[in-house]
Image (cartoon, grey):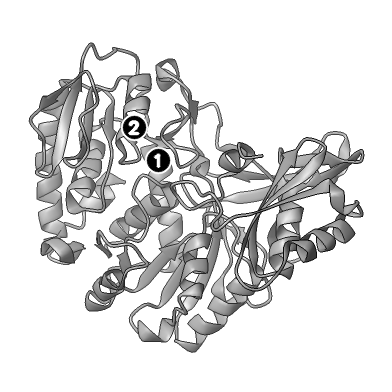
Amino acid sequence: MIDAVLGHADESPALIAPALGAHLTYAELSARVNEVAERLQTAVGGRRLVFLAPGPDVQAVLLYLGCLRAGLPVCLAEPQSLPLERLANAYRPALVLAPDTLATPEGWTPTASPVPGYVAALARGSAEYPLHPELALLLTTSGSTGSPKLVRLTARNLESNAVAIAEYLGLGPDERAVQSLPMHYSYGLSVLNSHLLAGGTVVLTPHSFMRPEFWRDADEQSATSFAGVPYMYETLHRLRFEPERHPTLRTYTQAGGGLRRDLIAHYHARATQAGARLVVMYGQTEATARISYVPPERLGEKVGTIGVPIPGGRLRLEPLEGDGSAAQLVYQGDNVMMGYAEGTADLGLGDVQHGLLRTGDLATVDDDGYFTLVGRLKRFTKLFGRRVSLEDVERELESTFPVRAIATDAGERLGIHVAVDGQVGDAELVAHLARFLAVPPSAIMMRRVAELPLTATGKKDYKAAEAVR
């Protein structure tokens, strides 16, 4: 992938950072990345693991691409001191790179940084361990780098997924994505990878999508696409976002969890009126980023589905043993990870997935080949001896009422964390669920919250919700 990105090497814009007045052409990007790659190789003295906590800036992109150019496996970590330190202590990389606003991990020795604005630190007694020759990138699976479980990806994974995304979105040199999601999150990274591979432009901004400065940067730089996870679209809906106020934006993409059907219909209609399109997508970090998408021209009739496989990928249903009523979604493609790592010993392992990913999602497929998620393999509870899908409970509440919900197993009862967007009482919610599940209201424990707990990437944080009883 790195050769494809740097192969453009012309005067068209690659990166724009309005807040810093930065504007890099592909020719400049190629030269800068090669310089950074040489400095990284000098700093680590061989093919060793590098940790990068990327900010929303040009320097982070240079460091990321520099690692790929130098052939150094790089882990993209959340840019927060405590989770970064925990993860670094688990893997003892040769070098840690982070914005200079973060504290250097305890016990690490500062060294010369390859780029300004970032600190570099060498591990004290850094461990020597085998690294598989195809290992290129490590990403966290849950949005929190406090967990040592990482996804092992190759350069082929990155290129395959970026090529597929560029194909189904029709990306080219005239596309400009505003980087609305962090680089350490696979969805955010896929926006960067696919646009640079296609010769497009990425607009980097330090501002949150909730700030007017974000939209000012997008408008002034003529951004053509915006990427968001469900809570971002829900927030924009509450803020009465109007696509027609941003005429250069012609593509809105959504992934990172299921968006409420009514909001999909709303944004599809508003985007269409504004001459734009909404592209609903599904993916997992284990598949580098994307697995399926709904072609925008079919979205009106396929609301609620995750669509069809991305170019080059295949989807099928695998019946669960002993349960003929449910089937797991299985994906096959060149973008499937080599496997997980839970410690340094796993970094030398080869490909244990062989292009096959059992997603852990339960699904159905219609006559047109469009898949719909109906639950998670492990997200069930038992009420009065019956198995209840927690996904079904959440979907029922969110499709019936203006709420966001997390359903949990609360022992003998069903636990519900609910954030209400409108006028609806707890008694009404409990009564509806009791009828839906055919259980007494006393089996449901409702907890109203101002906001649902979310991971760093905006997904529902089930572990945090389960910890609160």
Point 23% across, 29% down: residue: 96
Q: Could you tell whether 157 is left or right of 445 in the image?
A: left
Q: Position of residue 150 (x, y in %)?
A: 45, 31
- Identify the residue under disc 2: 82
Q: Type of residue at label 2?
A: Leu
Q: Residue 293, relative to residue 2: is it above or below?
A: below
Residue 230 lies, with reference to residue 242, above or below; the image says above
Left or right of 407: which side holds 147? left
Using residue 153 as the reference point, say whether residue 437 is left or right of it.
right
- Type of residue at label 1? Arg
Residue at 40% across, 61% down: 166
The quarter of the displayed image where residue 355 is located: top right
Kindly state the secondary structure of the residue where label 2 is placed.
helix
Q: Nearer the viewer, residue 354 or 47?
A: 47
Q: Is residue 338 above or below residue 244?
A: above
Q: Quadrant of residue 17?
A: bottom left
- Location of residue 33 in the rendering, given as x and y in whole percent from the top left corner: 15, 45
Residue 77 appears in the figure: yes
The residue under the point 29% across, 69% down is: 214
Q: Residues within 10 Å of mark 1 (few under 14, many from 20)?
A: some
Q: Find the distance from the CA under tag 1 to the CA under tag 2.
A: 32 Å
Identify the residue at horizontal 20%, vertical 29% (top origin): 104
Q: Is residue 455 left or right of residue 173?
A: right
Instruction: Name the image quarter holding the C terminus.
Output: top right
Q: Which residue is disc 1 drawn over?
A: 156
